[in-house]
Image (cartoon, helix red, strand yellow):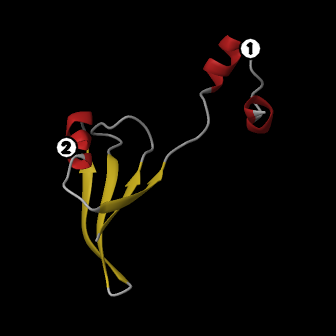
Amino acid sequence: MKIYGIDFTSAPGKRKPVTLAVGELRNKQLTLKEIHAVTHWEEFETFLNRKGPWMAGMDFPFGLPGSFLSTVGLPHDWKKYVS
């Protein structure tokens, strides 16, 4: 089975691409096969439309920008604004 690791730091671009790791799980062993740097959303969408079965683990920020929190009047402490 294909296993993908996806690391978001921001919207994809040349300075900060989305990193995609492609692994293969076979006989309880995970082997890293490829690493891609995605710089456009269209490329990411194409990646997600790959034929399955596959699983993905994603790492992306769960917080909101401080300027947004201030604008809508939410506290800047994560535990407070999600409760």
Query: Closest to the observer: 30 or 68?
Result: 30
Query: Closest to the observer: 39 or 72?
Result: 72
Query: Closest to the observer: 63 or 57?
Result: 57
Pointer 2: what residue? Answer: 46
63 relative position to 82: left or right: left
Quarter of the image that includes the C terminus: top right
In the rendered view, tell whether residue 14 sits above or below residue 81. below
55 relative position to 59: left or right: left
Query: Residue lying farthest bottom?
Result: 27
Query: Residue lying farthest front?
Result: 53
User: Is label 1 in a helix, a strand or a loop?
Assistant: loop
In the rendered view, tell whether residue 66 sits above or below residue 8. above
**Quadrant hosting residue 39:** top left
In the rendered view, tell whether residue 56 sits above or below residue 3. above
Q: Are marks 2 and 1 in contact (CB under 8 Å)?
A: no
Label drawn at residue 25: none
User: Is label 2 in a helix, a strand or a loop?
Assistant: helix
Precedes in sequence: disc 2 or disc 1: 2
- Of the residues shown, which amino acid type is indicated by label 1? Gly
How packed is label 1: few (under 14 Cα within 10 Å), some, or many (20 or more)? few
In the image, residue 78 lies at what x, y percent? Answer: 73, 36
- Of the residues shown, which amino acid type is indicated by label 2? Thr
Task: Compute the Cα span from label 2 to label 1.
Answer: 38 Å
Quarter of the image that includes the N terminus: bottom left
Which residue lies at the image location 26% right of the left edge and 51% below the top edge? 37
Foreground mark, 2 or 1?
2
Which residue lies at the image location 32% right of the left edge and 44% below the top edge? 17
In the image, residue 75 lies at what x, y percent? Answer: 78, 24
Label drawn at residue 73: 1
